[in-house]
Amino acid sequence: MAKAIPSRSEDYSLWYNELVKKAGLAENSPVRGCMVIKPYGFAIWEKMQQTLDQMFKDTGHENAYFPLLIPKSFLSKEADHVEGFAKECAVVTHYRLKNDEGGKGVVVDPEARLEEELIIRPTSETVIWDSYKNWIQSYRDLPILVNQWANVMRWEMRTRLFLRTAEFLWQEGHTAHATKQEAIDETNQMLNVYATFAEEFMAMPVIKGVKTESERFAGAVDTYCIEAMMQDGKALQAGTSHFLGQNFAKAFDVKFATKEGKEELVWGTSWGVSTRLMGALIMAHSDDDGLVLPPKLAPIQVVIVPIYFKDEQLAQIEEVVNPLVSELKAKGISVKFDTRDTHKPGWKFAEYELKGVPVRLAIGPKDLEKGTVEVARRDTKEKSFEKIDGIVDHVSGLLEEIQSNIYNKAKNFREENTKSADTYDEFKELVEHGFVLAHWDGTAETEEKIKEETKATIRCIPLDQQKEEGKCIFTGKPSEGRVLFAKAY
RNA sequence: CGGGGUAUAGCGCAGUCCGGUUAGCGUACCUGCUUUGGGAGCAGGGGGUCGUAGGUUCGAAUCCUACUACCCCGACCA
């Protein structure tokens, strides 16, 4: 069998790039750093969107849409925010092209320069808080719980499909509250929504934590995150939830009248996940034969491949399979019956493995005689023959089993590759292969030096951190608990 | 933006050092026959501004210059 993609052990990074392309998820675009998300990749993203969107609505949020273009002056209203994003903003300076006098296509019309240049949103806090100023007058207008699904642009130096692209799709929630506690509760609530989504739908275990000052979102008081381990032991930040304090309310002068008639600044949060989750999903479970998708997010959960020699045999197989397809669909299982005669069964097997379809059924003449069907599961590659009677329940159970199996596999992998280090030498060795829990003196200087020397960063201070007296692995200064270090995507 | 590499058919590559038939191979594609339980076989066929723009030369995929894009390693970042 021809290898479709390089193996993970040969070249992990090449394996990822090739997998994304060969599985038909995405490809590079003519514009550097941007990507074309192909139908199969977008189908997975849509499933993520639908699930998350429902979770947001279940927690009281509404969708809205704010514009792509933001007046340049808005960005500079919040000092930390501009500091964080200015370096990677694309700027719109003109609004018209004209025919080149030399006849070489079109050129920018110098007459059409904008009075105020516009930036393409790298995130929408500024334009949204500018609106909130008008939306909020009294405590009766609060809270505002808004989410938007949008594209944003951050001009990155080095890009990789899904993991880091110049333009990416995401959702960004932006909420406004009357009290600090309510905003903090919202921040925590959304972090938990993300963690639940990652674990229950993506089958990807995550560690919830709070970012150190140097990793914090530009403009936030606190940034919370979920961190996942990829199969090469590196960490990937899968979602963030920010407690913004009153920073944006101050910057945009968003005040409200309390019940007591006093004027106070509004408290804010923002939270987001992006198409980067696609990268996380791919790297969390897939193997050298292709994608391994969790059943809950797989666009096709079951594929049925007929094996036949003559057209009459296909007709006989269809008689058995067509009702089966209806039954599976009635149970809410997405199924594809691949009757194409342009490809042989072996080709189809390899193709659906590459695409990560969780369950494959194969039915041929021998099965028709015996009333059986071959059932193959993608996660373990195990095959078995099952009676066609009752196959729907079997498949339904199998999908659940695959969902929990790949979660457990990912969780075991993370646990095996998460170690504690008590000396710097030990730390340097361990952090090459996974997560390391170690004591840190709490200073940005130490964090920076460790990063320079080892490439590892503090991914987060875990929320479930145990109180433990210890000494910083780098400086030996006292520490009250271990933080999570790893190399990161 | 620094260092290194690459650019030839949809995809993967050879040819470039040492300029000289009609630019080649694998795969994919099209047609036909045989096939179909793990990426089928045979036969025939189509597909190329050799990344772009200049230059050297009787002659350039090949030599020279500039540019662009992609990959790897740094700096930056979700």
Image (cartoon, grey):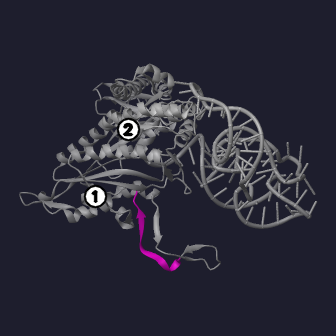
> Above or below — where is A343 with respect to A417?
below
Q: State the image coordinates of residue A16 (x, y, percent, origin top left).
A: 53, 38
Q: Residue furthest front?
A: A312
Query: Relative to residue A390, is residue A338 depicted above or below?
Result: below
Q: Amino acid at mark 1?
A: Ala
**Residue A367 picture location, percent across and down:** 47, 23
Which amino acid does the dot numbered 2 rest on?
A: Ser
Q: Quadrant of the N terminus of chain A?
A: top right
Q: Quadrant of the rendered structure where residue A281 is?
A: top left
Provide residue A463's location: percent of width, then percent of height. 29, 33
Residue highlighted by disc 2: A334
Q: Is residue A111 magenta?
A: yes
Q: Which residues are magenta?
A: A109-122
How many labels sit on residues? 2
Question: Is residue A292 shown to the viewer in this render?
Answer: no
Residue A186 falls within the magenta-colored stretch = no
**Could you say which is closer to the camera, residue A116 or residue A167?**
A167
Label at residue A381:
none
Asked whether the viewer can see residue A296, the reply is yes
Residue that mark 1 sits on: A64
How far across and how far down the image is residue A287, in percent?
A: 51, 30
Which chain's residue wears label 2? Answer: A
Mark 2–mark 1 contact, CB under 8 Å?
A: no
Q: Horizontally, is A148 left or right of A473 in the view?
A: left
